[in-house]
Image: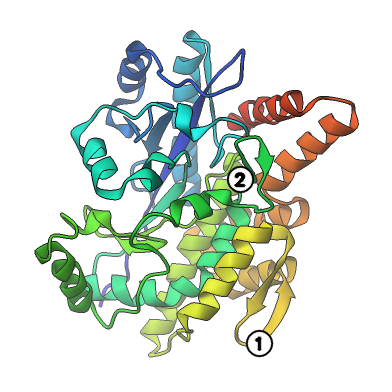
Amino acid sequence: MDRPAFTLGIEEEYLIVDRETLDLVREPEQAFVDDCTKRLGDQVTGEFLQCQVEVGTKPHGRVADAVDELIGLRAGVAEVAERYGYAPIAASTHPFARWRDQQRTQKDRYADLRDAIGQPVQRMLACGMHIHAGIEDDDMRIDLMNQVAYFLPHLLSLSCSSPFWEGEDTGLASYRLAVFDAMPRTGTPDFMESHAAYRRLVDSLVSAGCIEDATKIWWDIRPSDKFPTLEQRITDICSNVRDTAAIAALYQCLLAYLYRLRSRNQRWRVYPATLIGENRWRGQRYGATGQLLDLGRGTLTPFSALVEELIELVSDEAEMLGCVPELLHLREIARRGTSADRQRRVHKEQIDAGAGKDAAMAAVVADLVAQYTES
């Protein structure tokens, strides 16, 4: 069997804020949306809420190339937004905006979602980062999905950017996941014996009238229904694009490593969903500064130590795929924390300096605006 391409495509969702108030722009001018499309073509789209936009790169073999394109897409959205007094931020929740104040994008498919799911989808004032990896063979895509699920909490821990919700500290590093988990068909995917078994599951839901197609299955990782890719969806969006690059490199390298095991008639052990779920929760709660279960040893282990093990585990793949610098940036994330940690630091500094609650939250948003184009 031919080796998969492991090409990468990165999708990011941004929130659009008013440069003066730093609150979300509830109803951006239609000209803003049109100008984004003129600037970036079909690589930028609207989202469920009018205050959101999504961009997506083309497939790339090298992480550096995908991230270079992503930097260009970020810059394009920022340039257009500035003309209208707006600014994009890359954070999975806005620190103080209220979901009830937001306006839904007027499209039939979004209206259908609201009718089918109710308030949980209306509360989806949350943005994510999805990474597609090219795996052409259907059964291999399913096999690697089963195995890489072990590492999804690690990817989440590296990405957290949603500690605040409606002006309050949630105590979580990724509150986005708490919002998203109110939706149906989310979380860790079922173990699948084959692609045929996956299709039977999808067909059962479709034939019963539960869903229209597989795009309505929103697992943390899933086979794309549009492309021959394996799409990880567990991660928050990273405020700093260098963190995005590190996570993309780790995801690509892990899949290549698991393929190498498979080519030797070996495999990563598949653990019970409850244990994966425990690590998912710990990543959601603590991000990169906590501990995860090392399921092989059965012990809680500092995340910084797990990062070192991950780098060693996939070092050969990183050399082969040309993403060693990006992979090594994982150490920097483990050292200084994620966007969630930085947001909390900015907030605390403002409070300690005598700022009021509203001013402190606004300072967090201002810092996110500044981070958006840092590279």
> Relative to residue 212, is residue 237 depicted above or below?
above
Of 8 and 125, nearer the camera is 125
- Mark 2 burial class by Cα count in 10 Å: few <14, some 14-19, many 20+: many
Q: Position of residue 67 (x, y in %)?
A: 49, 42
Residue at disc 2, secondary structure? loop
At 55% from the left and 39% from the top, the residue drawn is: 93
Q: Position of residue 190 (x, y in %)?
A: 35, 75
Q: Where is mark 2, residue-wise?
A: 161
Q: Position of residue 153 (x, y in %)?
A: 55, 66
Q: Amino acid at mark 2?
A: Ser
Q: Is residue 151 among what the camera can see?
A: yes
At 45% from the left and 72% from the top, the residue drawn is: 148
| Residue 207 picture quarter | bottom left
> Relative to residue 274, is residue 342 depicted above or below?
above
Q: Where is mark 1, residue-wise?
A: 298
- Mark 1 burial class by Cα count in 10 Å: few <14, some 14-19, many 20+: few
Q: Amino acid at mark 1?
A: Gly
Q: Say how the picture is coloured.
A: rainbow
How many labels, in total?
2
Horizontally, residue 89 falls left or right of residue 272, namely right
Q: Is residue 319 among what the camera can see?
A: no
Horizontally, residue 70 falls left or right of residue 311, namely left
C-alpha gap between disc 2 and disc 1: 28 Å
Q: Position of residue 176 (x, y in %)?
A: 52, 49
Q: Quarter holding the C terminus?
A: top right
Residue at disc 1, secondary structure? loop
Q: Quarter holding the N terminus?
A: bottom left
Of pointers 2 and 1, the one earlier in the residue sequence: 2
At 24% from the left and 59% from the top, the residue drawn is: 228
